[in-house]
Image: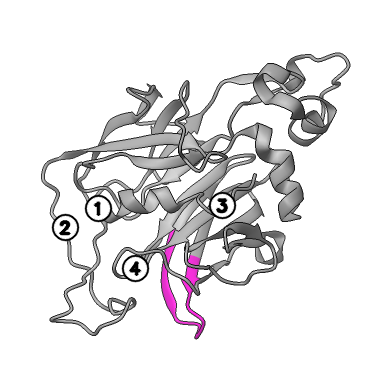
Amino acid sequence: MLAESALLVGLMAGCQQILDIPGDPRVVASGPWRCLGKTPVATEAARSTAMVRVQPCNFITDCTTNVTGLTAQLCDKRDVGCLSPRLVGLTQTDGEFRFDVPTAGGGFSGYLLIDSPVALCTDSAAFGGVAGKALCDLVAPTCNPTAPDARCYTKLYAPSMLFFNPPVVNDMPSAMPLQMFPISGLPTVIAAAGIQVDPAAGNLFIQALDCDGHPAAGVTYQIQQFGTQVSPLFVDNGIVSSVATQTDASGIGGFVRVPPGFVSVTGYLADATAIGGIGVQSISSVLTYTTLIPTVNAL
């Protein structure tokens, strides 16, 4: 699954609310990467739990319209496939997911697993003009469009995992926007980007932030585990590019065809300086979203 320019920009606002990076210019060097190599300043949790707020919205409309009718589960970071969720059956209130997470041990660094209703890939009321053979071949390859059955059902929006980085330590005063990718937009976006996806693999999107919590240009990402199995992509002047080799001002990049399992991603500057890392999960046909901040967060 693919997305482009605004895919993770909305997440930055939420991350800035809880970002824990030393940034006092009176005691450290200047510049957007002045905190590299410094010891992070610990943030004390105000109480034993913190409220998280997530607002799903439509990627195609650049988050100007909300997405409703979704459900979610809250999962621990190491809970592969969310087999032992902390919370189940989460639904939206005024369009938002609202729930409490534990803050002990440095904050909550797990993820929200979001799911959507399903419809037949031949259903034009659900998928518009792209419904039919082309969409079915892409998202439900075992489906026979001339005789639709259970094999032809697909999600209205791509299932998504939102990993919280930095860990949540205090209440969020406003909701983090999370752009959900409508399956109806998949064929055109894939064609425009010129990148093949694998329904048996996952897809990872990351936004790099600097020491001020701003989107960082000039960052590359590496996944150590899978080498050339994965295909990198970056947002380049508002579009997804398989040719660009580093982030633009949006800070957004990622990988498609990521094998399922734990994934460790490291961000680098042009001079090969490592700016930090993040451990997340990849699940087949799921979009994984996270941010990368100037600290190393190992699995």
Report the Cα–Cα distance between label 4 and label 1: 14 Å
> What residue span does the magenta drawing correspond to?
266-278
Query: Mark 4 or mark 3, which is nearer the start of the sequence?
Result: 3
Q: Amino acid at mark 2?
A: Thr
Q: Secondary structure at mark 3?
A: strand
The answer to whether mark 1 and mark 2 are in CB contact below 8 A is: yes
**Nearer-N-terminus badge (4/2):** 2
The residue mark sitting in front, 4 or 1, is 1
113 displayed left or right of 254? left
Q: Are marks 4 and 1 in contact (CB under 8 Å)?
A: no
Q: Is residue 26 above or below residue 93?
A: below
Q: On residue 204, which mark appears? A: 3
Label disc, if present, on residue 18 of the rendered structure: 1
The location of residue 115, given as percent across then percent down, is: 52, 28
Residue in view at x 62 percent, y 46 percent: 202
Q: Which mark is residue 43?
A: 2
Query: How would you rate the neighbour count of disc 3 (Cα within 10 Å): few for under 14, some for 14-19, many for 20 or more?
Result: many
> Dot 4 corresponds to which residue?
295
Q: Is the Cβ of the residue at disc 3 closer than 8 Å to that at disc 2? A: no
Give the image quarter of residue 232: bottom right
Question: Residue farthest to the right?
Answer: 146
